[in-house]
Image (cartoon, rainbow, N blue to C red):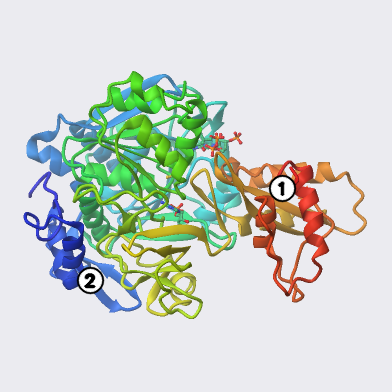
Amino acid sequence: MATDKYVKNGPGGIGMATYKEIYGAWRADPEAFWLRAAGAVDWFDRPTRALDDRRKPFYDWFTDGVANTCWNAVDRHVAAGAGDRTALIHESPVTGSSAEISYAELQERVARLGGALEARGVKAGDRVLIYMPMIPEAVVAMLACARIGAIHSVVFGGFAANELAVRIDDAKPKAVLSASCGVEPSRMVPYKPLLDGAIAMAKHKPKFCIVKQRAQLAAELDPERDVDWDAAVADAPFSECAQLKGSHPLYILYTSGTTGAPKGVVRSSGGHMVALAWSMANIYDIGAGDVFWAASDVGWVVGHSYIVYAPLIVGATTILFEGKPVGTPDAAIYWRICSQRRVKALFTAPTALRAIKREDSEGRLPAGFDLSTLRTLFLAGERADPDSIAWAERALGVPVIDHWWQTETGWAIAANPVGIELLPVKHGSPAVPMPGYDVAILDETGTPAPVGTLGSIAIRLPLPPGCLPTLWNADERFRKSYLSTYPGYYETGDAGMADEDGYIYVMARTDDVINVAGHRLSTGAMEEVLASHPDVAECAVIGAADALKGQQPVGFLCLNAGCDRPHDAVAAECVALVRERIGPVAAFKTAIVVARLPKTRSGKVLRGVMARIADGAEPRAPATIDDPAVLDEIGAALGRAGLGEMA
Ligand code: COA
Ligand code: AMP
């Protein structure tokens, strides 16, 4: 089997130098384009076709190919003699440690954990839930599942037990892989009690849990159900890479939707490998031996794609960072690691840059480090504000590349493809569509909007390899959520426009999803929690602009008639309730009691109007508003909470 090869510049290769030509080649013959890109992957059986459209409007890719993601990410590099190359660097300023793991060592650890799972009855197609902090075992866990064909579902550590329980009931995992604790700068997060609470709450009960005991805090194990990680792998057999169809789901990753129930995004393994390999070469300009650092968490899609799978598939070295951009120990940590580890490309969220900029407004800190290997800084996860981009460009002297994508797509919809050519950077735009994405800006009638006009951003079907084929056990929800508004298109949920050069501008969400510190959250889910408080009659949650986190959730509460409890007490209970049910990641800190909510005459709550008041902007109330005087009351209440124009 071939190794370390990846298709530079995709189809056409040599001689196909420009973005325009490559995008044009995809448009001219998508099937040939993706079959050629599939050459970057080792297959047990090569796919005979790229697109499988037999279940339209559900599409999948490389379904008759047979491969294994772990083989491609780990084993093939060892087989090719690169076993000594560093696969993973763990940088953990919160525990004061760092470690390096070679490809050969990674293979050994992954194969043994796979063996431990198989020995306990886990088979291809079974689900395994992973609830872990940013330690190497989290990466080992994902790859071990990929190796034996178990479908992993990683849950971010900042979610509460209740959210974990919802995911357990949806994915029905046979096993859970976890650790005793996470380490946040201000506190230890004991994972095991959260996991125990979640399993107690869930209807579905996993057969067993394998728990990594960390030195910082030991967990109590249930001898009936829990197994110590080190003991489980010590005598485990070496598992083989299962031969899996391209359509075999590699993982389920839950993301926020418009209701409290998260959506289980499914990732098929074949298209995922092909798309990620293509993106590493052509978007990030990363290949074998390069050091790539995505400063995210394995609980998010960025972590799945660009901490774990993509860098390893191309034989690069990936960095797993357990820390924060500031305070662990200081605002220079990113530059220190980039310098010490010879990082070629760094990928982070604009929030992280804003946090660093706040402590180093002149951008002086990078100058204290040798950053000669750093070629590019990539940003995604939320709208990149032009100020932060300009600050980073000045401080680092390298291109700062915004790119736009979502959990559903798994890789960039729009980017500046540095691996092909650096296109002119336009601040405020994540640049141009990548091959595979036919992006359209549509008006309310589904008609393409003129250049420069705001509309819904949609992608003409089929979506490219790597994107979700459906939602886990929820074909109908997939169709309803994404395909029903604009027939023939996938609705991204983002609004924006395109300019005369084809650059895309992503401005806002069209649904109730908000983006807090690069984390996608559902205001609907928070409203469900607030509404469950016994004193709350009615509520609304909006996203208000926040200088650091982009947005922050703000809750408005109308109390039951006759409730004479102090408003502050109810508000504090509501804040605590959201933390308890959704988790600290919701960053829900502000609940305000108001007499009534602004509504239309038909009773629709005007959340958008409230958000504009919170941001100090002209509210622009619709003509259908029931009582415009409510807007003044909302403005005054926000002012008392230190938000909005009256703050
Ligand atoms: N496990 C448990 N709790 C977690 C957690 C985890 N893995 N990650 C975050 N939390 C908790 C935090 O401790 C915090 O709790 P607190 O309310 O007790 O302080 C809360 O969740 C919010 O966390 P966070 O959003 O990280 O805010 P912060 O104030 O601790 O840090 C920033 C602010 C800007 C430094 C931080 O948000 C950041 O690094 N943002 C970049 C995000 C990013 O890279 N996203 C990737 C998407 S591509
Ligand atoms: P997630 O699924 O958590 O990755 O969140 C995806 C959402 O984050 C997108 O639908 C956008 O709303 C937002 N987003 C991600 N990247 C960008 C970007 N570069 N510019 C603007 N918004 C972005």
Tell me how many marks there are. 2
Neighbor class of circle 1 (other Cα within 10 Å; few <14, some 14-19, many 20+) is: some
Secondary structure beneath disc 1? loop
Upstream in the sequence, badge 2 or badge 1? 2
Residue type at the position of mark 1: Glu
Residue shown at 30% from the left, 40% from the top? 399
Residue at numbered disc 2? 51
Q: CA distance from mark 2 to mark 1?
A: 52 Å
Q: Quadrant of the C terminus?
A: top right
Percent of width and height locating residue 190: 55, 32
Percent of width and height locating residue 572: 76, 41
The one of 189 and 623 positioned closer to us in this rendering = 623
Percent of width and height locating residue 166: 55, 55
Residue shown at 17% from the left, 72% from the top? 28
Secondary structure beneath disc 2? strand
Task: Tell me the quarter of the picture where residue 66 sits.
Answer: bottom left
State which mark lies toward you, 2 or 1: 1
Classify mark 2 as within 8 Å of ligand 2 or not, answering yes or no: no
Q: Which mark is residue 446?
A: none
Neighbor class of circle 2 (other Cα within 10 Å; few <14, some 14-19, many 20+) is: many
| Residue 152 versus residue 217 in the image, above or below | below
| Residue 245 versus residue 530 in the image, above or below | below
Residue shown at 26% from the left, 34% from the top? 109
Compared across the picture, whether 401 is left or right of 330 comes to left
Q: Which mark is residue 645?
A: 1
| Residue 199 versus residue 244 in the image, above or below | above
